[in-house]
Amino acid sequence: MCIFEYDDKREKELIRKAEYSEGMKEGERIGREAGKKEEAERIFKIYQLFRANYTENQIKEKLGMNVEEVRKILERFK
């Protein structure tokens, strides 16, 4: 005779929670990677426009950003 009772419903619930948690972690990791890629692409686009003699305001208008964001990124290249 076993001193432990096996509860199938509880076991499935625990497995579901563990799998959900792992899925959330993986989703967050993928989201961070995608965000980094988008940011790199945006920085590169700003740099291209700056090299093509666009002003900060023109870049802002073209990319739909505020001028402070554009200036902050352009400061990296100066």
Image (spheres, rainbow, N blue to C red):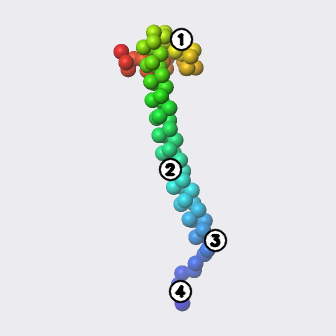
Quarter holding residue 74: top left
The residue to which callout 4 is attached is 2
Residue 26: mark = 2
The residue to which callout 3 is attached is 9
Q: CA distance from mark 1 to mark 2?
A: 38 Å
Q: CA distance from mark 3 to mark 1?
A: 61 Å
Q: CB atoms at circles 4 and 2 under 8 Å apart? A: no
Three-letter amino acid code at disc 4? Cys
Secondary-structure class at tag 2 = helix
Residue 5: mark = none
Secondary-structure class at tag 4 = loop
Front label number (4 vs 3) = 3
Please tell me which of labels 1 and 2 falls first in the chain: 2
- Structural crowding at the residue carrying mark 3, measured as other residues with C-alpha within 10 Å and reported as few (<14), some (14–19) or many (≥20): few
Q: CA distance from mark 2 to mark 3?
A: 26 Å
Three-letter amino acid code at disc 1? Gln
